[in-house]
Amino acid sequence: MSVEIERKFLVVGDAWKSLGTATTLRQGYLSSHPDRVVRVRVEGQTATLTIKGKNQGISRGEWEYDIPLEEANALLSNLCERPLIEKMRTRITHAGMVWEVDAFSGDNAGLVVAEIELESETQRFDKPDWIGAEVSDDPRYFNANLLKHPFSKWEA
């Protein structure tokens, strides 16, 4: 088992857009239960099945496996909860760390968040200028929750 330690932030402005190349991600959930999430993801020509445990602060157990692209597409089409999560991901290196900026589409259009994976919960890192408020502890921003409560339906 590996442990995912991740912090999540809102993104401000558009300066990040010129800093990397975006790829399309489609992902669906076979289980979006808060204690166990099972996700299927297609990114380009790569597909993965990921199992995540319950969040303990900003950490949780994570198991990830490559799966055949055809099987991932079948799972996304036939078995995953609706709606699917669709987004453009841009990976940006800043001060030696990789930030993943996700610009959502569909029911979550308008939402842009950045995530950084850490080696420990106390690891220090520099934030780029385009990083806004931290939302790591706000479950509304968990991808598995965005399918049940899309950003477009949030009250202003």
Image: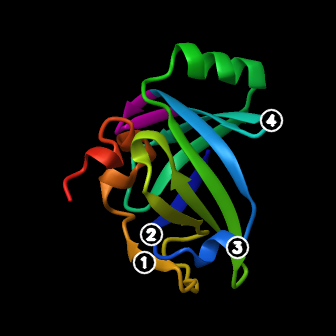
Label 4: few (<14), some (14–19) or many (≥20) C-alpha neighbours in 10 Å:
few
Discs 3/2, front: 3
Report the amino acid beneath label 4.
Gln
Q: Main secondary structure of the magenta part?
A: strand
* 142 w.r.t. 48: above or below: below
User: Which residues are drawn in magenta?
Assistant: 31-39
* Quarter holding residue 153: top left
Q: Is residue 105 magenta?
A: no
Identify the disc placed on residue 45: 4
Left or right: residue 29 compared with residue 57? right
Front residue of this view, candidates 151 and 95:
151
Q: Nearer the N terminus, badge 1 or badge 2?
A: 2
Please provide percent x and percent y for residue 152.
32, 47
Report the amino acid beneath label 2.
Phe
Left or right: residue 16 compared with residue 34? right
Report the amino acid beneath label 1.
Gly
Residue matched to label 1:
132
Discs 1/3, front: 3
* Distance from the alpha carbon under mark 1 to that under mark 3: 18 Å
The reply to whether the C-beta atoms of the residues labelled 1 and 2 are less than 8 Å apart is: yes
Front residue of this view, candidates 132 and 121:
132
The reply to whether the C-beta atoms of the residues labelled 4 and 2 are less than 8 Å apart is: no
Left or right: residue 83 compared with residue 148? right
Q: Nearer the N terminus, badge 4 or badge 2?
A: 2
Residue matched to label 2:
9
Question: Number of marks in the image?
Answer: 4
Identify the disc placed on residue 18: 3
Secondary structure beneath dot 4 equals loop
* Distance from the alpha carbon under mark 1 to that under mark 2: 6 Å
Q: Note whether residue 27 is visible.
A: yes
Q: Nearer the N terminus, badge 3 or badge 4?
A: 3
Report the amino acid beneath label 3.
Ser
